[in-house]
Amino acid sequence: MAAWIEITRAKDASESRTAAVWVKDLRDPNGSAKRIAEPSGSASGLAWSRDDRLAFLAAEDSSSEQVQLYVSDKPGSGKAKKITSIQGYLDDPRWSPDGRRIALLWIEGATRTPGPTEATKADTGVVASKIDEQRLAIVNLASKEVRAITPADMYVYEFDWSPDSRELAYLSAPGEGDDNWYVAELFAVDADSGMVRHILKPPIQVANVRWSPDGKAIAYIGGIMSDEGSTGGDIYAIPASGGEPRDLTPGRKSSPNWFRWLPSSQQLLFTEGVAGDTAISTLDLASLSTERLWKGEESIAFSGDQNVSAVVRNSWSHPPEVWAGRIGDWREITHSNESFRPEWGEVKSVKWKSDNFDVQGWLVFPQPYDASKHYPMIVEVHGGPAAEVRPSWPRPGLPLELLSSQGYFLFMPNPRGSYGQGEEFTGANVKDFGYGDLRDVLAGVDTVVKSYPVDNDRVGISGWSYGGYMTMWAVTQTHRFRAAFAGAGIANWQSYYGENSIDQWMIPYFGASVYDDPAVYAKSSPITFIKNVRTPTLIVVGERDGECPPPQSYEFWHALKTLGVKTEFVLYPGEGHGFHKPEDSRDVFERLTKWFQENMPAQSKP
């Protein structure tokens, strides 16, 4: 049986988003999918029990934001039953192995959706941090009782059951949840008594905590990660009782981003980013040898094992659909997006050398395309920096791939600091923001210009978040770019340290706080070199952005305006780091398109 959630997104402010839960029996290839929950405002957290019951979170109707826990005892036969009636934020339900309980994350009486990319609350009066602690709660399915079991002063980020259903391993830190994921430690809690024991204080960020089937070990992904939820690193294992972690993938030239234990407890199945592609591999713990089962130019969300798996597959040319079967031998079981066609041109992988590194990126061709003509190009630097551009159907928000239909090449590099080339590559921008990664970007631009019909005099740069920073940085370091778009950027690392809501992420990258080593922050700050700028620059940011607060954009815009550089600054009311209003996202895209057309026209050049 496979289960999935289909979301119908709002087209404008007058419509609401709906979500529905569907299941399909994989033993009947000709059978139809069945909806087991009526369309509601939101649905998430699909979780199968060992005896094939399905749990998920959903709102009661499309007008409600409050989700509850539902369980379908026989998915595909009848509707799911509502289990909880509690208030607050719920996330990530997981069955106990014995099937008697479901654990989930719960912020009782939450006043906002948690997460650093969400809009922050407005500060007025005496400013004091009100912390909505996310706790680990257990739902007893027989009594429907909900009980929080982790300490009230600790924020829990993720968890996993022990195979005997007696304990749960979890990542947690005291204080504000948005910030302190970067210093979270590994604990275990007794599911009955609530007794907590400490397992590990990791030296770096940790994600994807998983208890082994034999109960002897806990594995996780550890590495330098700049955003919670953007996972990459090496896979580690530690005795469940505590001790010294063991790196299971040392020196690997890829970035594992998800894994699960196989039943023997001697092997892991994992997905990884590999120089812009996605791969699925197995890892033998005794020999540390790996076997690649599949690799492709696409993005996947994976569930299952080698024999039976379900994936959401999407690429530059194919929108997301659910596929199922043996790894690499999947068959498509949904056709929800089959009417969509790409509105952009062909996409090619580009590889080049920069310093001692192999670097990769993606080049989107203009649509339509005439090889006898030369076209302008826009460089889009991704956020993070610990992230990776992989082949995927553009998501709602700011799909710059659509610039292809406006007559541009679009170049999306994965410079050092990105995932996909191993931990040495991901950590290569530590204490070096803007220097080596800009060299990588510029070397990639030169490679593209030499190999494809790009007009060397009409190259622009754009980016959001760290990409917005790199845009601000690039125009202070070079006059290579004719026009620039900086979304939610960072102009001054020194002032940013005291303004943002996630300052803990900076210390692993800069080596110290700004109060202990202000010079390392200054040397990578665009504002330090602001008088070099000549490039027309469009600047935008959300009014409630806690990750890259508006003062950073104000500071850059004010300097450009003072120095007589062509600029425009747009502040979007109520928006956070990630925009939620479709009309605001459309406005950003229209503005940046107009900006590049004005300052770097897209008329093709013979």
Image (cartoon, rainbow, N blue to C red):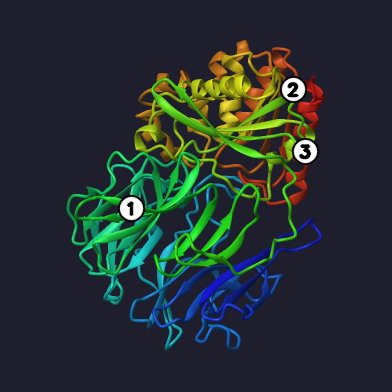
Mark 1 or 2 closer to N-term? 1
- Residue under label 3, please give it: 405
* Residue displayed at 51% across by 58% down: 301
The total of numbered circles placed on residues is 3
- Tell me if residue 42 can be seen: no
Quadrant of the image for the C terminus?
Answer: top right
Amino acid type of the residue tagged 3 in the rendering: Ser
- Residue under label 1, please give it: 291
C-alpha separation, residue under disc 1 versus residue under disc 3 = 40 Å
- Location of residue 368 by image quarter: top right
Which of the two residues, 511 or 24, is positioned nearer the viewer here? 24
Tell me the element at label 2: loop
In this view, 51 is above or below 592: below
Amino acid type of the residue tagged 2 in the rendering: His
Mark 2 or 3 closer to N-term? 2
> On residue 190, which mark appears?
none
C-alpha separation, residue under disc 2 versus residue under disc 3 = 15 Å
In this view, 312 is above or below 468: below
Percent across and percent down for residue 305 are 40, 66
- Location of residue 161 by image quarter: bottom left
* Residue displayed at 70% across by 71% down: 62
- Residue under label 2, please give it: 374
